[in-house]
Amino acid sequence: MAADGSPLPPLPAAFKPVQHHLKTATDHDKRDPVIAYYCRLYSMQTAMKIDSKSPDCRSFLIKLMDLLEQMKLQLQGTEAITNEVVGQAHVESYALKMFLFADNQDRAANFNKSVVKSFYTASMLFDVLQVFGELSEDLIKHRKYARWKSAYIHDCLRKGETPMPGPLGGEEGGVEAPPPMGFKDMPPQQPPVNQFPPPTNQVPPGAHAPPTTPAETPSNPVPTQPAAVSYDNYLQPTASGGVSLTPDEMNKASKMCRYAISALQYEDVPTAIDNLQKALRLLTTGKES
């Protein structure tokens, strides 16, 4: 066990890009083992692409694989581990809750280390979602915004300056920010449940929560009455407007429907409606947004 409490040996220098993802895993071992598992899975997949041959890196990867196998065995009855759709919904919901907590605190001008840590941890969890496939455009924007905000607020606090709350003009076009200085020394932060946004539309763990980009207002509202769909065959559905979908687009629509079913299991009707509308929009127009 490493000196920082991690069950792994010291991290090789080459694996520094996943340092904070692994730290997040350690922070969540007791708080949320599912988050801890996927943080380590992402770290392993990323680290293997960096270096899987040098002795120190190979030794670390073997230990990390062993730990993942142990966790998978311990969590074998957990649906978020055995079902990819549920697992993705769990991680995405958790990341968005942390993002929204930090965003609400930021817009209320409550600037502190907890907000910095929450923004940055949310950005890392958006990284982790890549174990399920490519990120959506909205999640990529969330990640970039969260990293920028964490670095910006931290830099202002370090200089004794007062940060500007909310989005600033032009920040979304910038590069992704590095971890704020001193980040590794900050204590683990977990936003209290009662500090999340009002519970009216709160999404319980495991349900899919569609992101809402803080700096933008949707330009194309979801149609309330999508056109009916007729199918020529399973792989080549044709909408009333003559739209043909590829197998990949069909899979995306199917996944949106599964998200809706997952949300209904938690009685989250707004999320279910949103995902069904997205699926219908894709099926009837051939476009996701």
Image (cartoon, grey):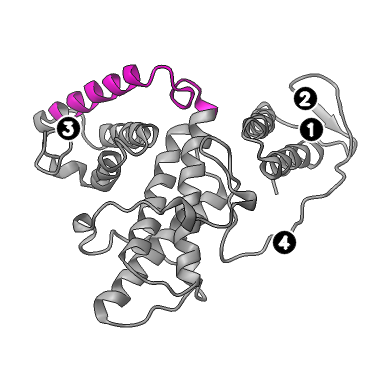
Marks 3/4: CA–CA distance: 47 Å
First to last magenta residue range:
59-85
Q: Residue at x 48, y 63 (%)?
A: 103
Q: Residue at x 44, y 61 (%)?
A: 102
Q: Which residue bears the numbered disc 3?
A: 7
Q: Residue 52 in the image: x percent, y percent?
A: 21, 29
Marks 2/4: CA–CA distance: 29 Å
Specify whether 133 is left or right of 232.
left
Asked if the residues shown at circle 4 and circle 1 are in contact, with their CB atoms under 8 angstroms apart, the answer is no
Q: Where 122 sits versus 111, above or below?
A: above
Report helix, strand or loop for mark 3: loop
Judged by depth in the image, the label closer to the viewer, 3 or 4, is 3
Occupied quadrant, residue 65: top left
- Say which label, 3 or 4, has the lower sequence index: 3
Q: Which residue bears the numbered disc 2?
A: 236
Magenta segment, prevailing SS (helix, strand or loop): helix
Q: Which residue bears the numbered disc 4?
A: 219
Give the residue type that dot 1 points to.
Ser
Q: Residue at x 16, y 32 (%)?
A: 8
Q: Which residue bears the numbered disc 1?
A: 244
- Say which label, 2 or 4, has the lower sequence index: 4
- Say which label, 2 or 3, has the lower sequence index: 3
Give the residue type that dot 4 points to.
Ser
Mark 2: few, some, or many residues within 10 Å (few <14, many ≥20)? Answer: some
Mark 4: few, some, or many residues within 10 Å (few <14, many ≥20)? Answer: few
